[in-house]
């Protein structure tokens, strides 16, 4: 039986894993995101060694931070494109890995990957239209619509919509280098830290940061509900480790929708509509494994 490689390529860390699914992850390696050549080298060495032990590698999937080019027909397929991350702009990530390992490589955004993982094994099983949003160092969203991951022109950038920003209530100007007070600029982990002068994970659940955070997130989620009509919204990322945020986000979403969409789940059961990832913090790397299976034509 063949095994698959998954790479969760994050802005702060890489996670490489070898396996076939959540109950069968056989090897794993984590390391900090340094220069591209070093990260690519470590990943290739890991898969060579791990695959030799476990009967051969069928394909690799890469679920990466972006922006990136996920279009297989494009000359820059597999590249990270305009990231502000030092050393990483216009980096070919998929190409060198595919050439070094000699296997098909699937490549998509971290959030599209996580969405695919949640579809196969997690909180979106049996659904064909849903959204996966991560709230961490940045805010990003992936979507499956009618059974296909959304790419279109490039890939969705759900973190850069504009929630209403009342500067009397919240004078913080926002930190997105492109838009300042877009959703990511106001509600990412670093935005929370900059506004309150303390890392998000150190703020108590009673801190006023969280109701403001929930309101901004709700204003980011509601447009996705109106536009894509998702059957479920999955919220992951480090900031969402604050479990008390979920009821707050649901309440604000309910208030903003104000009963307009007459779907039972929105009117009566937001607890099962806005949920954490079924795969927990393994959604990213398992999503990458799912991308590998798809690249191998095995799903
Ligand atoms: P990345 O986005 O780099 O993949 P994370 O999703 O862990 O990684 O996001 C990191 C951000 O999330 C940081 O800004 C950090 O302060 C915040 N964060 C991490 N863990 C928690 C937590 N338990 N509660 C609140 N915020 C957290
Ligand atoms: Zn922005």
Image (tube, rainbow, N blue to C red):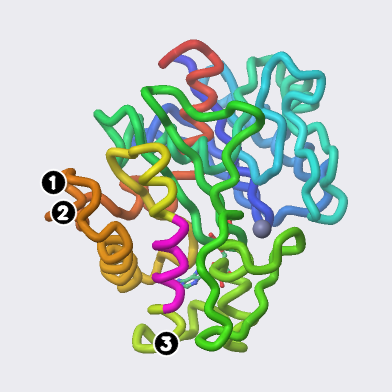
Q: Is mark 3 on a helix, strand or loop?
A: loop
* Residue 282 shows up from this direction: no
Disc number lying in front (3 or 1): 1
- Segment colored magenta: 212-220
Q: Is residue 19 above or below residue 245?
A: above
Left or right placement of residue 298 versus residue 5 in this view = left
Residue at image coords 57%, 39%: 156
Q: Can you identify the residue that label 1 sits on?
A: 264
Which of the numbered marks, if any, corresponds to residue 208? 3
Q: Residues within 10 Å of mark 1 (few under 14, many from 20)?
A: few
Q: Reading the chain from its start, which is encountered first: label 3 or label 2?
A: 3
Q: Can you identify the residue that label 2 sits on?
A: 267
Q: In this view, does 144 lie above or below 267?
A: above
**Distance between the Cα atoms at labels 3 and 1?**
31 Å
- Evaluate if marks 3 and 2 touch, with contact meaning CB atoms under 8 Å apart: no
Pick the quarter of the image with the C terminus: top left
Snapshot quadrant of residue 137: bottom right
Q: Is mark 1 on a helix, strand or loop?
A: helix
């Amino acid at each position: 039986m063949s095994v698959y490689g998954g790479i969760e390529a994050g802005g702060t860390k890489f996670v490489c894993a070898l396996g076939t699914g959540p109950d069968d992850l056989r090897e794993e390696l984590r390391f900090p995101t340094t220069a591209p050549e070093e990260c690519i080298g470590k990943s290739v060495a890991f898969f060579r060694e791990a695959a030799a032990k476990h009967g051969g590698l069928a394909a690799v999937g890469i679920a990466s931070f972006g922006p990136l080019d996920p279009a297989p027909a494009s000359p820059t397929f597999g590249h990270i494109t305009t990231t502000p991350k030092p050393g990483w702009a216009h980096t070919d990530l998929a190409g060198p890995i595919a050439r070094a390992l000699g296997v098909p490589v699937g490549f998509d955004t971290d959030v599209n990957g996580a969405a695919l993982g949640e579809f196969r094994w997690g909180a979106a099983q049996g659904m064909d239209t849903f959204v996966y949003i991560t709230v961490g160092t940045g805010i990003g969203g992936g979507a499956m619509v009618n059974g296909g991951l959304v790419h279109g022109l490039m890939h969705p950038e759900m973190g850069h919509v504009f929630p209403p920003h009342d500067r009397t209530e919240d004078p913080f100007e926002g930190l997105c280098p492109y838009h300042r007070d877009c959703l990511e600029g106001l509600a990412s982990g670093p935005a929370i830290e900059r506004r309150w002068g303390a890392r998000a994970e150190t703020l108590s659940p009673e801190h006023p940061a969280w109701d403001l955070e929930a309101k901004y997130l709700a204003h980011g989620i509601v447009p996705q509900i109106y536009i894509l009509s998702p059957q479920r919204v999955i919220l992951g990322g480090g900031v969402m480790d604050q479990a008390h945020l979920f009821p707050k986000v649901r309440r604000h979403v309910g208030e903003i929708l104000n009963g307009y969409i007459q779907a039972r789940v929105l009117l009566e059961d937001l607890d099962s509509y806005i949920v954490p990832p079924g795969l927990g913090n393994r959604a990213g790397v398992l999503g990458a494994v799912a991308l590998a299976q798809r690249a191998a034509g095995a799903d």
